[in-house]
Image (cartoon, helix red, strand yellow):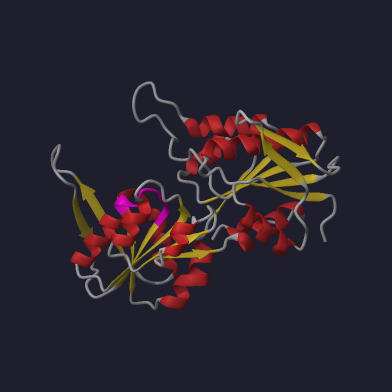
Amino acid sequence: MFKKVCLFAGNGNPTLANEIAQHLEMPLAKVRVERFSDGESWVEIKENVRGVDAYIVQPTCAPANDNLMELLIISDALRRASAGNITAVIPYYGYGRQDRKVAPRTPITSKLVADLIVCAGVQRVVCMDLHAGQIQGFFNIPVDNLFSMPVMLNDYLRKNFNRDVVFVSPDAGGVERTRAYSKRMDAGLAIVDKRRERANVSEVMNVIGDVTGKDCVIIDDLVDTAGTLCNAAKALKEAGARRVVACATHAVLSGPALDRVRDSVLDELVVTNSIPLSETGRALGKIKVLSVANLLAEAIRRIHHSDSVSSLFV
């Protein structure tokens, strides 16, 4: 089915890369990725790629700088080996939250990373649930920003919830994303309004919408330290919610996140495998992981055969 195409994997998420390869019924190409004693990354492509369309599966999750450099170096190695088209499949786009200047003399690192990726020789990017949609405009090459919504809906939500459910945005910025879920499930919509009345006073969480006696599903693109998520879940329970579940595409889960999730009133946290979950996270018992390998594999298949990928943006 596939001619003149190779699928490469960095060390960012080799398990996901293997799953994608299985869906595409093709082996991962041989690439040697090592580190020198001083920490520098070194890459060697172990097979002929002249004229071959190359797809590199590499999220830029923690350790973000190491994974980003691996992606750049693999891209450069492929370009210098005369590969055809080079596509970076980045399930999680690191530095995505630094997408604008929030204070004087601060960087827009999302744009910097985009420039680095293009300079390394990448000719197309496939990513998932960018933190800010405008990041697509930071690239001067085609960008396909897929959404995990089909996976969340088909593999979890429709199997576990009926129409008596309310989808909740944990802040005002996520309302559009949450409305898309509620629309497809023909369900209610609520918002957790977080505000601080004055300095050094704890935040007040106000629930906008009726959640009394309802199953609530909090929708977010990522969960990092889980502070906002757990506080939102607590506010929903206090407002009379019967059950609170959270769905987030990217399980960053840094710092005290796992402890907070364990001690929270959340019944379950549902994430995807765009970022590999740690052993501690898997042992927690509250986190369910859904695979996006099929979605990414289908995107690769359609791109390679020059078919439309618009139906994947659901």
Front residue of this view, candidates 182 and 214: 214
Q: Position of residue 306 (x, y in %)?
A: 75, 53
Q: Is residue 171 left or right of residue 289?
A: left
Residue 99 position (above or below residue 261): above
Residue in view at x 40 percent, y 72 percent = 186
Q: Position of residue 313 (x, y in %)?
A: 56, 57
Question: Is residue 186 among the parts visible in the rendering?
Answer: yes
Which residues, given as a range, are shown in magenta? 220-228
Question: Is residue 122 among the parts visible in the rendering?
Answer: no
Q: Quadrant of residue 177?
A: bottom left
Residue in view at x 24 percent, y 75 percent = 213
Residue in view at x 45 percent, y 49 percent = 252
Q: Position of residue 115 (x, y in %)?
A: 59, 30
Front residue of this view, candidates 204 and 178: 204
Front residue of this view, candidates 213 and 310: 213
Residue in view at x 64 percent, y 42 percent = 142
User: Most extreme residue toward the front, as rendered?
Assistant: 37
